[in-house]
Amino acid sequence: MDDGNQPDAAAAHPGTPTLADTPAAADPERGSGPARSGRNLPVAAGVGVLLGGIVILTLFTVKATFLIFMGAAGVVALWELARSLGSRGIHAPFLPVAAGGTAMWVCEYWWSDRAVLASLVLTVVVILAWRLPAGTDGYLRDVMAGVFVLAYVPLLAVFIVAMLAPADGARRVVLFVILTVCSDIGGYFAGSLLGRHPMARTISPSKTWEGLAGSVLLCLVAGAVLLPLLLHGHVWQGILIGAGAAAAAILGDLAESAIKRDLHIKDMGSVLPGHGGVLDRIDSLLVAAPVTWLLMAVFVTAHS
């Protein structure tokens, strides 16, 4: 998610009409608001609260039902990404990736890491075979796109399932989600109010160093407060987990922005008012998941 402040890219590259330099109407990621981010903030906040309510409800009733919610979001995200790639003539196989991703998540939650690895490898084999009937033209391109989609959504999301699996998994996932959301919120408001210095102009003109500082600061505070409260960890451990989650979330946001710019699209979809597509909402979560899982695995002992 963009942090809300957008410096004038054209001033830095006079006479060079690149994607980052074009007017807002022509820029696939440039907006104008709340005022400048192109987001309807009340609608976006309402959708965010609704999604958060579903997360809490599923996690703290029957924990495994969270996997159903994850599965629905994952399928939509895969479809959005496959469709977006298709708009540029890149055909990633949707069905093998969706089936393989489901198998990986089920194996992680109910079976073992070895079963996850086996599911991953078998899915790659199926992708190789799935594309053969369409001939050799573009074969490597489409197979590599399928492997990328498999790694980008289902494989990264496996680490959310890994956080969920222990007895205290619901609290681990809640902490992970809150930290990642804090990165978005801190970046958005700090960038909107204070942002002046662009951080990654050619990738995401809205990103500023001030927004980055807001993301990191809010994540550090949230980690310091919530890790002891939810998982009986130490404050310093919460600060480190918050820092790792912030760095990974920002990377995830920038990576998806780069993908969208390469594909010349504004959003991956439009199913979430105020946010765009599902993948636009979970981009930070996907990349933050393995980092947060690893830090929790190092610092936190499982509790019932």
Image (tube, rainbow, N blue to C red):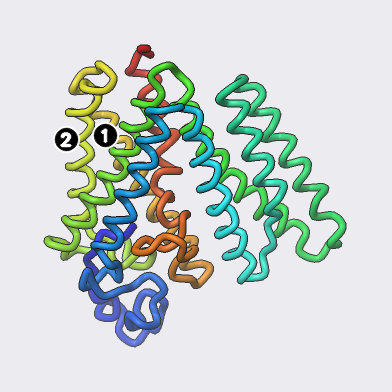
Residue shown at 38% from the left, 70% from the top:
29
- For the N terminus, the image quarter is bottom left
235 in relation to 276, above or below: above
| Residue 272 pos. (x, y %) | 41, 60
From mark 2 to mark 1, how far is it between C-alphas?
8 Å
Residue 117 sits in which quadrant?
top right
Mark 1 neighbour class, 10 Å CA radius: few under 14, some 14 to 19, many 20 or more: many
| Residue 176 pos. (x, y %) | 34, 34
What is the three-letter code of the residue carrying label 1? Answer: Gly
177 in relation to 146, above or below: above
As drawn, is 193 to the left or to the right of 75?
A: left
- For the C terminus, the image quarter is top left
Q: Secondary structure at mark 1?
A: helix
Residue furthest out toward the bottom = 15
Q: Secondary structure at mark 2?
A: helix
Q: Which residue position holds label 2?
A: 221
As drawn, is 230 to the left or to the right of 92?
A: left
What is the three-letter code of the residue carrying label 2? Answer: Val
Marks 2 and 1 close (CB-CB < 8 Å): yes
As drawn, is 34 to the left or to the right of 15?
A: left
Which of the two discs, 2 and 1, labels the residue nearer the N terminus? 2
20 in relation to 143, above or below: below
Residue shown at 23% from the left, 39% from the top:
219
Residue 199, visible in the rendered structure: no
Residue 200, visible in the rendered structure: yes
| Residue 194 pos. (x, y %) | 12, 61
Q: Which residue position holds label 1?
A: 242
Q: Nearer the viewer, residue 131 or 181?
A: 181
Residue shown at 23% from the left, 53% from the top:
187
| Residue 35 pos. (x, y %) | 21, 73
Mark 2 neighbour class, 10 Å CA radius: few under 14, some 14 to 19, many 20 or more: some
